[in-house]
């Protein structure tokens, strides 16, 4: 049980970092004026923020009472977290593109490593919500 709590804590730390990159991507899209892209991403960021930082049992109970069925709730949670993971990866990519490096191969290995960490922590949190 203690090992599981430590794993969840590490995933939460990575989720905080992911929120930074997702918010960075959201602000860039907002600055460019692309409403059809930043509005759904902002909604998914806000929803995932409330889902992650509320207690998992309370947020699942809240979603079950508000929404129609459990299948619809699970589909909504999957969509929200996938948009969150993808927006954090795009935010990381935009930030890496701003780093002035002549050789692009110096950026590819750190980018892939951080992308794997982000994807793993996002899927870890997602599986906590989909468990019944």
Image (cartoon, rainbow, N blue to C red):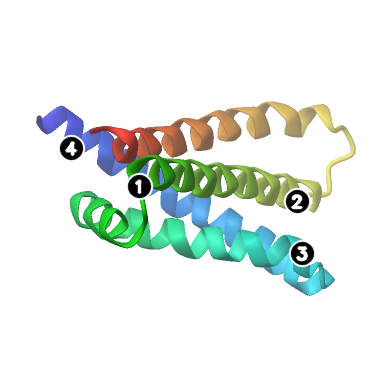
Query: Residue 7 at what x, y percent from top left?
Result: 26, 33
Q: Residue at x 16, y 28 (%)?
A: 3
Q: Determine whether the residue tagged by mark 3 lies in a helix, strand or loop.
A: helix
Q: Is tag 3's residue or tag 1's residue first in the polypeptide sequence? A: 3
Q: Is tag 1's residue or tag 4's residue first in the polypeptide sequence? A: 4
Q: Is residue 109 above or below residue 92?
A: above
Which one is in front in this view, the residue at disc 3 or the one at disc 1? 1
* Distance from Cα at disc 2 to Cα at disc 4: 33 Å
Crowd class of label 4 (few under 14; some 14 to 19; many from 20; radius 10 Å): few
* Closer to us: 65 or 49: 65
Q: Is residue 122 above or below residue 3?
A: below
Which one is in front in this view, the residue at disc 3 or the one at disc 2? 3
Q: Residue 94 bears which disc, if any?
A: 2
- Labels 1 & 4 near each other (Cβ < 8 A): no
Q: Is tag 4's residue or tag 3's residue first in the polypeptide sequence? A: 4
Q: Is tag 2's residue or tag 4's residue first in the polypeptide sequence? A: 4
> Quadrant of the rendered structure where residue 125 is?
top left
Q: Residue 5 bears which disc, if any?
A: 4
* Closer to us: 65 or 20: 65
Which one is in front in this view, the residue at disc 4 or the one at disc 3? 3
């Amino acid at each position: 049980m203690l090992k599981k709590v430590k794993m969840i804590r590490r995933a939460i730390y990575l989720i905080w970092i992911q929120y930074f990159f997702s918010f960075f991507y959201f602000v860039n899209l907002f600055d460019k004026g692309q409403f059809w892209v930043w509005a759904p991403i902002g909604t998914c960021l806000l929803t995932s923020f409330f889902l992650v930082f509320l207690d998992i049992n309370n947020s699942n109970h809240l979603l079950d009472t508000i929404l129609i069925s459990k299948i619809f709730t699970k589909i909504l949670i999957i969509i929200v977290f996938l948009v969150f993971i993808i927006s954090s990866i795009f935010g990381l990519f935009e930030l890496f593109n701003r780093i002035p490096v002549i050789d692009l191969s110096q950026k590819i290995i750190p980018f892939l490593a951080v992308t794997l960490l982000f994807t793993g922590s996002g899927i870890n949190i997602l599986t906590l919500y989909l468990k019944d």
